[in-house]
Image: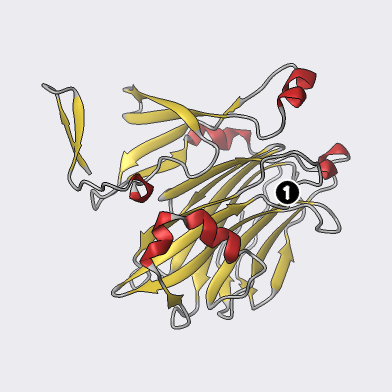
Amino acid sequence: IGVYDLKRDAFVPDTVLDDRRLWLKIDYGNYYASKSFFDSKNNRRIIWGWANESDSSSDDVAKGWAGIYAMARTIWLDNDGKQLLQWPVEEVESLRRNEINHQGLELNKGALFEIKGIDTVQADVEIDFELTSIDNAEPFDPSWLLDPEKQCREAGASVHGGVGPFGLVVLASGDMEEHTDVHFRVYKSEQKYMILMCSDIRRSSMRPGLYTPAYGGFFEFDLQKEKKISLRTLIDRSAVESFGGGGRLCIIARVYPVALVDERVHLYAFNNGSTTVRVPQLK
């Protein structure tokens, strides 16, 4: 990644990319003003960030507050030295209640599996997607790296693909008029595979005047070696915080579903790709 120059008090990257749109990000969503500290007791670096509101300033006044902290994350350098990985600190797991566990699910094209038995308003979901084949992966266009959000908008969760989209539908109303999609698509690029991860909140709420983009980013993944892509999503009413590929790409989004008023929201795993996806574990 690079080195820190003490004399110049500056970070010097190994590779200089003039176009900042190609720079890797700590988070590809609504994440700002992060700070980190070293936890010497547990030999880990922890990072905290702020997620501001995506509704109006008048809503802030009505609530009497604005902005939340994202979950504290452990951050470390990947074994290949190319990027930072992030994961919720292990203390978050102490908040878990009423655990459920599904194993050996199979999601064929068009599958929509409802995850029941948990509080879908506040949930910590971990799911592994095992690819039965990567032969149908669509070709990757390098220009997409300049605007991955555009690719998330144009190739949304309802648009059928080769390998993907597959992922989670969270905070969904009974009629699916409101829902947030967190999903992956797999693309083939020369001798490697590129994974597009999206957190699409365009249909997250029926309320007018909200900022509802389709967040997204790409990460490289060795699918020849490991044909399983992990996703962990933390749901907390207006916050949807997702970690893809073992923490290679993170997205936090703020959403405001009307369905939350009576707390009748649903949670699903889905696959809209032509390739069957197995779920060896969902918890």
Against 35, residue 241 (above or below) is below
Q: For the residue labelled by badge 1, is the local secondary structure a helix, a strand or a loop?
A: loop
Q: Which amino acid does label 1 sit on?
A: Ser
Which x, y percent locates residue 229?
Answer: 47, 62
Which x, y percent locates residue 193?
Answer: 37, 69
Q: Quadrant of residue 167?
A: bottom right
The residue at 62%/25% (across/down) is 67
Which x, y percent locates residue 158?
Answer: 67, 68
Outermost residue to the left: 7
| Residue of label 1 | 204
Outermost residue to the bottom: 135
Which x, y percent locates residue 26?
Answer: 41, 40
Q: In which quarter of the image is residue 20?
A: top left
Going by the image, does 98 lie left or right of 26?
Answer: right
How many tags in the picture?
1
Q: Which of 152 and 92 is in front in this view?
A: 152
Q: Which of 280 and 207 is in front in this view?
A: 207
The residue at 82%/52% (across/down) is 173
Going by the image, does 198 lie left or right of 73?
Answer: right
How is the structure coloured here? secondary structure
Q: Residues within 10 Å of mark 1 (few under 14, many from 20)?
A: many
The quadrant of the rendering that contains the N terminus is top left
Against 180, residue 33 (above or below) is above
